[in-house]
Image (spheres, rainbow, N blue to C red):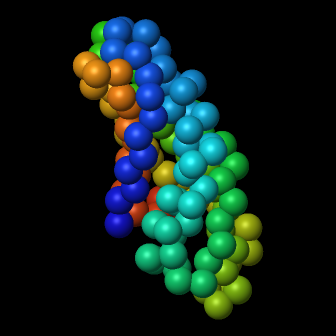
């Protein structure tokens, strides 16, 4: 399962990592919930944070999101997960991010 989300940003070499981070935090909850539900059908998630960094000289971004999962059927209570997310901006000034899978349990 992959999630894709488009967000507007500029097409120059400016750093738009905060724009993508903010979009993940506002629109990512439902996308990550959908990904998690594919692997843990009864789970509910809470997106805790997202941090992105720009690859120097490009409009490519690497992001990490932390979230917690609760799923009584699977015996999970506040299980922490880490999710890798990548983002890009194209020359028309449109950015998008995507995440694959439900992430990795941590802690």
Residue plotted at (34% across, 15% down): 11
- In the picture as drawn, the residue positioned furthest to the bottom comes out as 73
Q: Position of residue 96 (x, y in %)?
A: 38, 38
The residue depicted at 62 percent of the width and 43 percent of the height is 25
Against 63, is 53 above or below?
Answer: above
- The answer to whether 107 appears left or right of 2 in the picture is right
The quarter of the picture where the C terminus appears is: bottom right
Work out whether 5 lies above or below 59: below
**Which of the 4 image quarters holds residue 86?**
top left
Give the x, y percent position of residue 26: 63, 45
Question: Does residue 39 sit above or below 96 in this rendering?
Answer: below
Task: Give left or right: position of 76 versus 27.
Answer: right
Where residue 36 appears, x then y in whole percent?
51, 69
Vertical placement of residue 64 versus 30, above or below = above
Numbered label tally: 0
Q: Does residue 91 appear in the picture of this structure? A: yes
| Rendered image quadrant of residue 59 | top left
User: Can residue 107 be seen by looking at this rendering?
Assistant: no
Q: In the image, residue 84 lies at what x, y percent?
A: 44, 47
Q: Residue at x 60, y 56 (%)?
A: 29
Instruction: Give 16 or 70, whichever is nearer the viewer.
Output: 16
Quadrant position of the N terminus in the picture: bottom left
Left or right, 92 with respect to 79, comes to left
């Amino acid at each position: 399962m992959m999630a894709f989300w488009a967000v507007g940003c500029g097409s120059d070499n400016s750093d738009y990592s905060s724009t993508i981070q903010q979009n993940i935090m506002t629109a990512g909850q439902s996308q990550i919930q959908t990904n998690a539900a594919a692997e843990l059908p009864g789970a509910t998630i809470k997106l805790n944070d997202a941090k992105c960094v720009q690859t120097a000289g490009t409009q490519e971004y690497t992001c990490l999101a932390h979230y917690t999962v609760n799923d009584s059927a699977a015996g999970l209570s506040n299980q922490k997960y880490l999710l890798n997310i990548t983002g890009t901006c194209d020359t028309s000034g449109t950015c998008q991010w995507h995440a694959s899978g439900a992430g990795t349990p941590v802690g």
